[in-house]
Image (cartoon, rainbow, N blue to C red):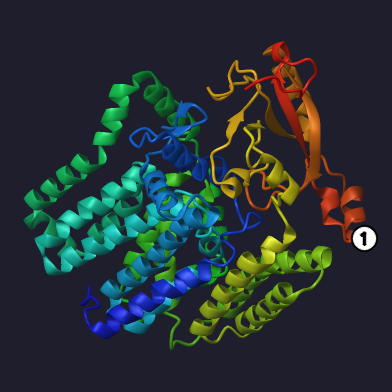
């Protein structure tokens, strides 16, 4: 390990990298038609709204229940942003953008600490910024990138401590690990622990420092526990049944000891367009002289991924593995492309370029070519040209970062996923709204600036509506209307339709958009007519009320 950045110029360069990442990740985050997933619109955006509206900060809530599935720190930070800037997509996703930029910065700092090479370290941050999954994930309020950012910062502080021996670095390590733990639990220890284990295997100096400083290390670990555990103890004490049920549900969902090769495929997809090229560099013995830390980086990568072969995982759990992958790729700077290097670069180009190209083509085909879509086409062509040549690592990273900024920030929103007609916004603005088993419209709570209640076939209403004579609106996807009516009738409620519209919806992930059960002929017909909305599911809006309070469905008496 070498000296870390200390000069004023170095600090300015790192600040510039952070701001550049914010600039790359921010376009489009305030639009309801931007990239999203169900974890964001159903949980991430609404839970902090519930905190703000109900004022219970210690136990986050959602739809009348304690929300204990994940720790509360990201929800707290988002609630603070809501309080400061108002409830909106911009104030929520701004938190996500900041954490994405922080992850980029932490990667550059780790590279700088390892190599002492300013240019390669900044390039490592730029490589991470240019990876498709980071450029997409940093636009959504999800738990994974903030957890990876805190893990990376903690590991950077550990590297500094191992080099300098300064005990002043130990309290920040405890704080950073505790912060990650309070976002997503024990996985933060897996992410940062992988780097520590790799160091202990490959560095005699790290092992020596640990042996000499075990009392300070023990005290730091105790500090971490003192910061991380009180919230868990509190909720277990106050809500023992709920917390035990939540814990058992989360453990069952992980499918421990069920072997799967999914993490390997996940890593290859997650690291596009760099994954194949970086893994080729890591596998070449002739690059060890050019990369003194290659053995450590490769082992760190392996240990980061290894636990997930035995745990059910999603690809985004592997974000921390992109740190060593980005640092390895950054060693292409001022180096000739190795044999087979262009082939692996072309493979990354083929897969990543196909995704971006499909978004640009679909937006232009269905919505017509405008400035944003034309710009998307130009950045896509630039990306293809630079990666086909594959002879300049800086240009490759910059073209990829620019591609995702334009395509995901400007072009993708033009597809109109989760679009809400103005008349629906106006209709629901001042009325109580219940979303049935969806929830749809997915981004309506963020557009209205308040948490809308979501229920399912068990039919629970908010206390303000339960048993009260007064009408309210219910919104449901068309395929769930029969189930909704049956559930409402069982609870003495009736509903009459007042509006309907069609919109493409993000179901589970941002790439699933059409209605269920689409046939091949329907898709081809929509393509021929340039009519994307023909593939969209229908959303129905109803005026509802208790039958005992109405003379006809939807007629309000009192309240």
Q: Secondary structure at mark 1?
A: helix
64 or 493: nearer the eye?
493
Horizontal relation, residue 430 to residue 241: left or right: right
Number of other residues with Cα within 10 Å of mark 1, as a class: few under 14, some 14 to 19, many 20 or more? few
Q: Is residue 202 left or right of residue 515?
A: left
The percent position of residue 465, horizontal first and vertical second, equals 59, 23
Seen at 49% across and 72% down, the residue is 23
In this rendering, does residue 130 appear at all? no
The residue at the point 72 percent across, 23 percent down is 556
Q: Residue at x 22, y 43 (%)?
A: 227
- Say which residue appears at 16% left-offset and 69% top-offset: 163
Tally the marks. 1
Where residue 307 sits in the image (x, y, percent)? 41, 46
> Up-down: is 263 above or below 470?
below
Q: Residue 67, relative to residue 345: is it above or below?
A: above
Indicate the quadrant containing the N terminus: top left, top right, bottom left or bottom right: bottom left
Residue 14 in view: yes
Q: Nearer the viewer, residue 509 or 95?
A: 95
Is 426 or 246 nearer to us in this picture?
Answer: 426
Q: Is residue 180 left or right of residue 359?
A: left
Does residue 54 appear to the left or right of 539 in the view shown? left
Which residue position holds label 1?
528
Q: Is residue 47 above or below residue 489?
A: below
Quadrant housing residue 389: bottom right
Measured from the top left, where is residue 357 in percent x and y? Answer: 71, 69
* Quadrant of the rendering where the C terminus is positioned: top right
| In the foreground, 499 or 290 | 499
């Amino acid at each position: 390990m070498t000296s870390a950045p200390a000069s004023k110029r170095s600090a300015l360069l790192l600040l510039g990298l952070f701001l550049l990442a914010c600039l790359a990740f921010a376009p489009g985050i305030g639009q309801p038609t931007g990239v999203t997933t169900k974890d964001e619109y159903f949980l991430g955006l609404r839970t902090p709204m519930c905190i703000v509206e109900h004022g219970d900060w210690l136990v986050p809530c959602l739809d009348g229940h304690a929300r204990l599935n994940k720790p509360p720190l990201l929800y707290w930070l988002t609630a603070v942003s809501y309080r400061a800037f108002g409830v909106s997509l911009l104030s929520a996703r701004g938190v996500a953008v900041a954490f994405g930029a922080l992850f980029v910065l932490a990667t550059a700092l780790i590279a700088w600490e390892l190599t002492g090479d300013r240019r390669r370290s900044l390039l490592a941050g730029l490589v991470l910024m240019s990876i498709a999954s980071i450029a997409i994930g940093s636009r959504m309020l999800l738990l994974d990138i903030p957890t990876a950012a805190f893990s990376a910062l903690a590991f950077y502080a550990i590297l500094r401590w191992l080099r300098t021996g300064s005990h002043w670095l130990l309290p920040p390590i405890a704080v950073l690990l505790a912060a990650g733990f309070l976002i997503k639990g024990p996985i933060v220890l897996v992410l940062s622990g992988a780097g520590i284990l790799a160091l202990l295997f490959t560095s005699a100096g790290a092992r020596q420092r640990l042996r000499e400083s075990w009392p300070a290390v023990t005290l730091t670990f105790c500090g971490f526990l003192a910061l991380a555990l009180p919230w868990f103890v509190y909720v277990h004490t106050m809500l023992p049944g709920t917390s035990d049920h939540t814990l058992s549900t989360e453990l069952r969902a992980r499918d421990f000891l069920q072997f799967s090769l999914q993490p390997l495929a996940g890593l290859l997809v997650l690291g596009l367009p760099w994954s194949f090229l970086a893994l080729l560099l890591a596998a070449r013995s002739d690059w060890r002289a050019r990369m003194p830390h290659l053995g450590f980086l490769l082992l760190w990568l392996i240990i980061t991924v290894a636990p997930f072969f035995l745990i059910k995982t999603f690809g985004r759990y592997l974000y921390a593995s992109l740190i060593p992958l980005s640092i390895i790729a950054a060693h292409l700077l001022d180096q000739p492309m190795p044999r087979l290097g262009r082939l692996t670069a072309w493979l990354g180009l083929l897969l990543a370029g196909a995704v971006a190209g499909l978004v640009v083509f679909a937006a232009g085909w269905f919505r017509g070519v405008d400035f944003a879509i034309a710009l998307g086409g130009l950045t896509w062509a630039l990306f293809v040209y630079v990666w086909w040549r594959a002879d300049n690592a800086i240009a490759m990273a910059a073209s990829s970062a620019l591609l995702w900024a334009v395509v995901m920030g400007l072009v993708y929103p033009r597809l109109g996923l989760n679009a809400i007609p103005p008349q629906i916004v106006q209709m629901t603005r001042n009325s109580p709204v219940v979303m049935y088993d969806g929830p749809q419209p997915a981004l309506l709570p963020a557009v209205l600036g308040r948490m809308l209640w979501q229920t399912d076939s068990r039919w629970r209403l908010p206390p303000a509506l339960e048993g009260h004579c007064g009408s309210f609106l219910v919104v449901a996807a068309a395929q769930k209307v029969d189930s909704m009516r049956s559930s409402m009738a069982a609870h003495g409620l009736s509903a009459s339709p007042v509006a309907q519209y069609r919109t493409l919806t993000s179901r589970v992930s941002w790439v699933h958009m059409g209605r269920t059960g689409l046939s091949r002929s329907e898709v081809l017909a929509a393509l021929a007519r340039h009519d994307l909305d023909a593939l969209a599911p229908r959303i129905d809006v109803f005026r509802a009320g208790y039958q005992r309070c109405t003379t006809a469905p939807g007629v309000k008496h009192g309240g």
